[in-house]
């Protein structure tokens, strides 16, 4: 419970005190060094006052600090064995196409139940993450999807789905691109996203999962469509 509360603070806590305190401390130390080097007493006075203040703010801001890497680790801890059973299934391995390796999809979700989000220097972190492994079999497409929450442990927020569909059941795959609104603390941002959609011939959506917006995702959709059309069998 304490760990989850700490992770929740990542999405709600403002890091300005931690950042400002660290910056003030660094500036104060530079001023003290310049004061000694150039006998600039005004800089020494400023540095001697600002350094303790910056240190206090830095320490107060760092208490309970959660880094983006902590969110990544929480996700990894929940995902590590999600596809282990399928990968070790010998009979499944015998059915897989030799020239197409399983496709792996893994992404923080930009939409989900009780979703929380935060903008980081290296991209967005959200409270929900989905990983999908797609297996290309001789006669069917099989996937295992695992959605995990870094804030909740219940089955409503952590879902595993395993499904298999004959290629003859499938209508096609496509990459949907749109824009969603994500919140980071008190600010809202328009963020682009891409999703892989797999549709059955009867119109049902069999899979809708966020993917990276790049050529690899387009290639994945193309490969699925070619398998449905019979162009990549064998």
Image: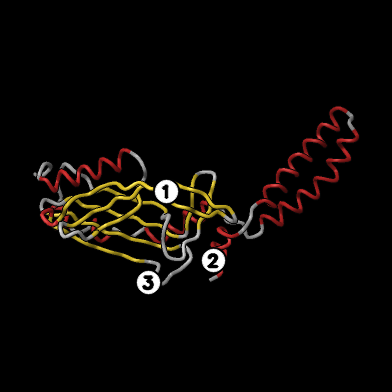
Q: Nearer the viewer, residue 119 or 152?
A: 119
Q: Position of residue 203 (x, y in %)?
A: 19, 59
Q: Which circle marks residue 155 in the picture?
A: 3
Q: Are marks 2 and 1 in contact (CB under 8 Å)?
A: no
Circle 3 crowding by C-alpha within 10 Å: few under 14, some 14–19, many from 20: few
Q: Position of residue 147 (x, y in %)?
A: 36, 61
Secondary structure of the residue carrying numbered label 2: helix
Circle 2 crowding by C-alpha within 10 Å: few under 14, some 14–19, many from 20: few
* Figure coloring: secondary structure
Task: Residue at 58% x, 61% y: name it.
Answer: 9
Which corner quadrant holds the C terminus?
top left
Cα distance in 3D space between marks 2 and 1: 32 Å
154 on left or right of 138:
right
Task: Residue at 89% x, 40% y: name it.
Answer: 45
Figure check: 181 above or below 220 = below
180 on left or right of 136:
right
Q: Name the residue beneath numbered marker 1.
A: 179
Task: Residue at 16% x, 54% y: name it.
Answer: 170
Q: Are marks 3 and 1 in contact (CB under 8 Å)?
A: no
Q: Position of residue 193 (x, y in %)?
A: 39, 47
Q: Position of residue 163 (x, y in %)?
A: 21, 62
Q: Name the residue beneath numbered marker 2.
A: 3
Cα distance in 3D space between marks 2 and 3: 19 Å
């Amino acid at each position: 419970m304490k760990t989850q509360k700490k992770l929740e603070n990542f999405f709600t806590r403002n890091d300005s005190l931690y950042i400002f305190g660290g910056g003030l401390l660094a500036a104060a130390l530079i001023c003290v060094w310049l004061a000694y080097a150039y006998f600039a007493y005004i800089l020494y006075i400023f540095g001697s006052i600002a350094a303790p203040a910056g240190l206090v703010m830095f320490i107060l801001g760092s208490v309970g600090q959660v880094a983006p890497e902590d969110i990544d680790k929480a996700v990894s801890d929940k995902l590590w064995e999600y596809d282990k059973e399928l990968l070790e299934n010998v009979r499944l391995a015998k059915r897989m196409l030799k020239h197409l390796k399983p496709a792996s999809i893994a992404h923080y979700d930009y939409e989900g139940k009780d979703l929380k989000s935060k903008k980081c220097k290296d991209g967005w972190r959200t409270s929900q993450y989905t990983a999908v492994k797609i297996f290309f079999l001789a006669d069917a497409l099989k996937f295992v999807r695992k959605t995990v929450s870094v804030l909740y442990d219940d089955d409503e927020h952590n879902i595993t789905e395993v499904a298999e569909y004959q290629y003859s059941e499938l209508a096609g795959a496509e990459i949907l691109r749109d824009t969603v609104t994500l919140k980071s603390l008190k600010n809202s941002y328009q963020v682009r996203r891409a999703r892989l959609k797999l549709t059955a011939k009867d119109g049902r959506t069999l899979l809708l999962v966020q993917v990276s917006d790049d050529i690899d995702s387009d290639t994945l959709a193309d490969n699925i469509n070619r398998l449905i059309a019979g162009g990549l069998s064998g």
